[in-house]
Image: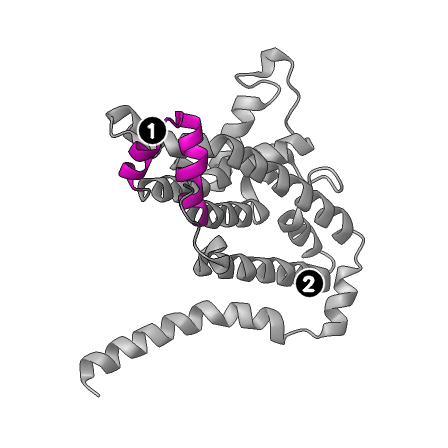
Amino acid sequence: MSLFKLGFGAAAALLVLFLALPVVALFVTTSASEILLGLRAPLVGPALRLSFFTTTASLAIVVALGTPLAWLLSRSTSRLARAVETAVQLPVVIPPAVAGLALLLAFGRRGLLGGLGLQLAFTTAAVVLAEVFVSAPFYLQAGTAAFRRVDTELLLVARTLGARPLRSFARVALPLALPGLVSGAAMSWARALGEFGATLMFAGNLSGRTQTLPLAIYTAMESDLGAAQSLSLLLVLAAFVLLLIVRSGGPALFGAPRVPR
């Protein structure tokens, strides 16, 4: 083996080991009985129910509003479209604390929309808004890329056959882009499930009301390490399953969609 391959192999192995070791530690430093005991902690049930509700609601909002936006961005090459595409990716790179403060200044009692009588901060609705804010870019990026891969000629054929724009979108573009959209939705849901910083600042950490799974882990760390570790394992397993869906191409598992005639 050459010195080049040996050096690169050692560097790669070192990084893989560093990334894998903390995850392995979560599993090997506990037992099945301890995991079950941790999941019986009082804060686990409410946090699970709240996380399921808020992530489902946020994903529904992201898909309903993000699909039309991803389609429009994929069909336009104007400077405005590029500016919008850049702007909607900002939540990916700004710190979570900044995202929470921005949401508070926009939707809080003294925020930009506070004069409208909206009382969103420190409510369950605030959790949903925080999750939409941080997770939408993942769906938009995947959706825009998926729609750009749709052959424009297929859409033109559908239009020449009398299909209206909405019908050609629903019968041609959407089925062809579906694997990418599902992968984007999975990544978006995973990001919403793991959201912590923006939720803590904008919604607080109220059990049964705004305390999601990551916030429950943060709270349990102070008094019950077993519960924190059990919840962490749940999140790791959920992330692993979602990554499998993304890597396998979503609906492609069941066969690639065909263009309807």
> Around disc 2, counting alpha carbons within 10 Å, would you say few (fewer than 14), some (14 to 19), or many (20 or more)?
many
Which residue lies under the disc numbered 2?
230
Residue 94 visible at all? no
Q: Which kind of residue does numbered mark 2 sit on?
A: Ser
- The extreme top residue here reads 115
The magenta region covers 151-179
Q: Quadrant of the N terminus?
A: bottom left
The secondary structure type at the circle numbered 2 is: helix
The image quadrant of residue 151 is top left
Q: Is residue 162 rendered magenta in the image?
A: yes
Is 186 placed above or below 148 here? below
Q: Nearer the viewer, residue 23 or 59?
A: 59
Q: Which kind of residue does numbered mark 1 sit on?
A: Arg
Total numbered badges shown on the rendered structure = 2
- Disc 1 vs disc 2: which is toward the camera? 1
Residue 27: x and y in percent read: 61, 72
In the displayed structure image, the side of residue 34 where residue 172 appears, left or right = left
Q: Residue at x 68, y 33 (%)?
A: 124
Is 95 placed above or below 102 here? below
Q: Residue at x 63, y 63 (%)?
A: 233
Which residue lies under the disc numbered 1?
159
Residue 201: x and y in percent read: 58, 36
Q: Quadrant of the C terminus?
A: top left
The secondary structure type at the circle numbered 1 is: helix
Q: Residue at x 30, y 34 (%)?
A: 157
> Around disc 1, counting alpha carbons within 10 Å, would you say few (fewer than 14), some (14 to 19), or many (20 or more)?
some
The image quadrant of residue 25 is bottom right
How many angstroms separate mark 1 from mark 2 (CA)?
54 Å
Query: Is the magenta region chiefly helix, strand or loop?
Result: helix
In the displayed structure image, the side of residue 166 where residue 219 appears, left or right = right
Q: Is residue 105 rendered magenta in the image?
A: no
Is 247 placed above or below 159 here? below
